Image (spheres, helix red, strand yellow):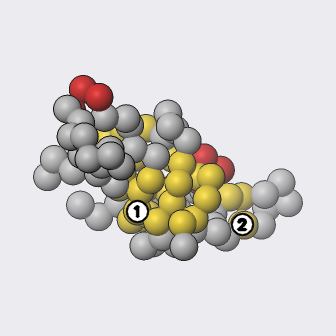
Amino acid sequence: MNMQPLGDRVVVKPLEPENKTKGGIVLPDTAKEKPQEGKVIAVGKGKVLDNGSVQAPEVKVGDKVLYGKYCGNEITTNEGEELLIMKEEDILAIIK
C-alpha cells in the first residue's frame, strides 16, 4: 500500500518484540511489551511554521527510530500489515 502522510506525520512499521529475555526465558504473547522501536516507511513534507515556510523533517525513509510507548495511531493495511502514523515530534531518537 502506497501511503503519503500529510504535514509533519510519519508512518512507522513497529519492529517485532523479542521472544526471549536476555537470560533465555521464552516469553508468552501476553507478557510481551508493546514495541518502541520501528522503521520509518513514509514521511510527510514537513511542519508548516508560523511564517508559512515548511521545516523539512529530520527523519527519512529507512531510519530505525525509537518512539514513545503509546504514541501514534495504529492502522492495519488491506494486506494485514500493522503500522503507526505519528507526528514527527513523537519520535524520541534515530537509532544509528
Labelled disc at residue 20: none
**Label 1 environment density (alpha carbons within 10 Å; few <14, some 14–19, many ≥20):** many
Q: Tell me how far mark 1 sits from mark 2, CA to CA.
A: 24 Å
User: Could you tell me if residue 46 is visible in this image?
Assistant: yes
Kindly identify the amino acid type of the residue bearing the numbered disc 2: Val
> Does 85 sit above or below residue 95?
above
Furthest residue to the right?
51
**Label 2 environment density (alpha carbons within 10 Å; few <14, some 14–19, many ≥20):** some
Furthest residue to the top?
30
User: Residue drawn at (21%, 50%), measured in percent from left and top?
Assistant: 81
Q: Is residue 93 left or right of residue 53?
A: left
User: Could you tell me if residue 4 is visible in this image?
Assistant: no
State the residue in front, 16 or 2: 16
Q: Quadrant of the N terminus?
A: bottom left
Q: Is residue 48 left or right of residue 2?
A: right
State the residue in front, 86 or 5: 86
Count the marks: how many? Answer: 2
Q: Quadrant of the C terminus?
A: bottom right
Labelled disc at residue 39: 1
Kindly identify the amino acid type of the residue bearing the numbered disc 1: Lys
User: Residue drawn at (29%, 28%), measured in percent from left and top?
Assistant: 31
Local secondary structure at mark 1: strand
Tag in front: 1 or 2: 1
- Residue wearing tag 2: 54
> Does 79 sit above or below residue 73?
below
**Residue 7's image quarter?**
bottom right
State the residue in front, 87 or 2: 87
